[in-house]
Image: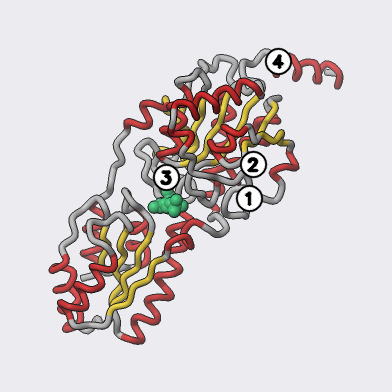
Amino acid sequence: MKEKDLQSEAVIAATSKKVKKIAVLTSGGDAPGMNAAVRAVTRCGLDAGMQVFGVYRGYEGLIEGEFLQMDRRSVSDIMQRGGTILKTARSDRFETEEGQERASSMLHTFGIDALIVIGGDGTMRGAADLSNFGVPVICLPGTIDNDLGYTDFTIGFDTAVNTVLEAIGKIRDTSSSHERTTVIEVMGRRCGDIAVYAGLSGGAETVCVPEMPVDVNRICNKIITDGHNGRTHSVIIVAEGAPIRTQDLVEEIRRKTGKEVRQVVLSYLQRGGSPTSSDRLLGTLCGAKAVEILADPDFDMKSYAVGQRCGKITSTPLKEALEMERDFKEELVGLINVLSK
Ligand code: F6P
């Protein structure tokens, strides 16, 4: 086939699609791997003959009309960077109907046929509200928390767990030398997955998570018995949303065991850093899937959540995805307790 024919075929294919102009934004807490998702959306979108726009500062930037047309070079050299090149925000204005109306009218003004949003639970609920104004939204799970029911893993979780793991190793060295107990607070207001996965792979003695009650007496008795059995230091991981405040737990352990206890709050360290290969892959595959959905000539102009289940990249109707309960793996906490006996 001649080059000219090939070009006109590509033009026909592009113009016969329903979705010709897409926009992408990142919202809520940033997560390593978001850049890989933005890159995949941009390059796959351009490859499918779409025009691609980046929206700065999440829903806040959407309300303000902060759009930038993307080309292949706009996303060069970003895979290895943590954070998000599109910036992010938590928008109070977008929580109001007026804010959502303004955001949807911005999409109309710029002629955007569909929006792709990368963020966590709050971002997705915002997307569902926006889709009530007739804009199809495809959501990608971008959060370190791993707190979404419809996907096995979220983009950024693996990097955060690895950051905590590195910290546990270093803290264990000094805890062991000084024969101390150290309580490490990790992120996760509603979800203990960072604590559990890092605790299990880092050999923590105990983890405290929002999903389970905390038995302070059991923790203290274990420290005392461990001491009698020759284990003179321990590392306890507490998720920030656990039913006991980290500071209170530290004081209780001091009081009940008479041992030296230190506290480390890892905080925003967990949100930064170069993404692991798993997060880059998940971001890339979810971004590519979002464009695949939109490029389908039979796309139903409805909203979807893209994720990963049992190793496969999936798409679930957005409202259904938001209703899916998270499956907290309590047995992993049990395993941590067995392994640390
Ligand atoms: O949702 C991601 C997260 O890092 C949570 O783990 C944490 O509780 C929260 O964001 C912190 O939010 P902010 O960035 O607004 O302080």
The label on residue 15 is 4
Q: Tag 3: Cα neighbours inside 10 Å, few (<14), some, or many (≥20)?
A: many
Q: Report how far apart the C-alphas of labels 2 and 1 lie in the structure.
A: 8 Å
- 18 horizontally vs 8: left or right: left
Q: Are discs 3 and 2 less than 8 Å apart at CB? A: no
Ligand 1 closer than 8 Å to label 4 CB: no
Q: Secondary structure at mark 1?
A: loop
Q: Report how far apart the C-alphas of labels 2 and 4 lie in the structure.
A: 23 Å
Residue drawn where x is 66% and y is 32% of the image = 53
Residue drawn where x is 24% and y is 50% of the image = 211
N-term mark: 3 or 2:
2
The label on residue 314 is none
Residue 54 position (above or below residue 222) = above
Which amino acid does the dot numbered 3 rest on? Answer: Phe
The label on residue 79 is 1
Which amino acid does the dot numbered 4 rest on? Answer: Thr
Which amino acid does the dot numbered 1 rest on? Answer: Met
Q: Are discs 2 and 4 less than 8 Å apart at CB? A: no
- Where, by quadrant of the figure, is residue 237 drawn? bottom left
Q: Which residue is mark 2?
A: 39
